[in-house]
Image (spheres, rainbow, N blue to C red):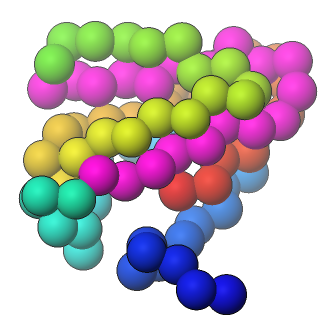
Amino acid sequence: WPSTFSGIGVIVNRETPHHCDPGASPSVYDLLVSLGQDHQAVLDLSDLGAQLGYPPGTMVYIAGKVLEHGIPRWGDGERIVIA
């Protein structure tokens, strides 16, 4: 299907170490969509010193090439992310 995004990733029940997205453009935002059920995940933006609640149904746009980000262990529940 047609998309403005150059790639898509699906992450299921995985911690994501802190990283920047090497293939992304610094002037384009990446869309992260949190799905699943009964989890208390947190989106950690270490460059900003911020931790954002990232429950199912959350959509976040970030400059993934510029901002270091990651998802630490979230405890119970199933987590699915489309990035």
Label the magenta part by its dominant secondary structure.
strand
* In this rendering, position of residue 80 left or right of residue 29: right
Q: Position of residue 2 (x, y in %)?
A: 58, 86
Is residue 22 at least partly visible in the picture? Answer: no
* In this rendering, position of residue 38 left or right of residue 43: right
Q: Position of residue 65 (x, y in %)?
A: 18, 55
Decide which of 59, 41 is in the foreground and name it: 59
Q: Position of residue 44 (x, y in %)?
A: 37, 23
Decide which of 3, 70 is in the foreground and name it: 3
- Vertical arrangement, residue 51 with respect to residue 83, above or below: above
Q: Is residue 45 magenta?
A: yes
Q: Is residue 17 magenta?
A: no
Decide which of 27, 67 is in the foreground and name it: 27
* In this rendering, position of residue 3 left or right of residue 13: left
* In this rendering, position of residue 69 left or right of residue 78: left
- Vertical arrangement, residue 14 with respect to residue 44, above or below: below
Residue 43 lies in quadrant: top left
The span picked out in magenta is 29-47
* Tally of numbered tags: 0
What residue is rendered at 67% in x and 87% in y? 1
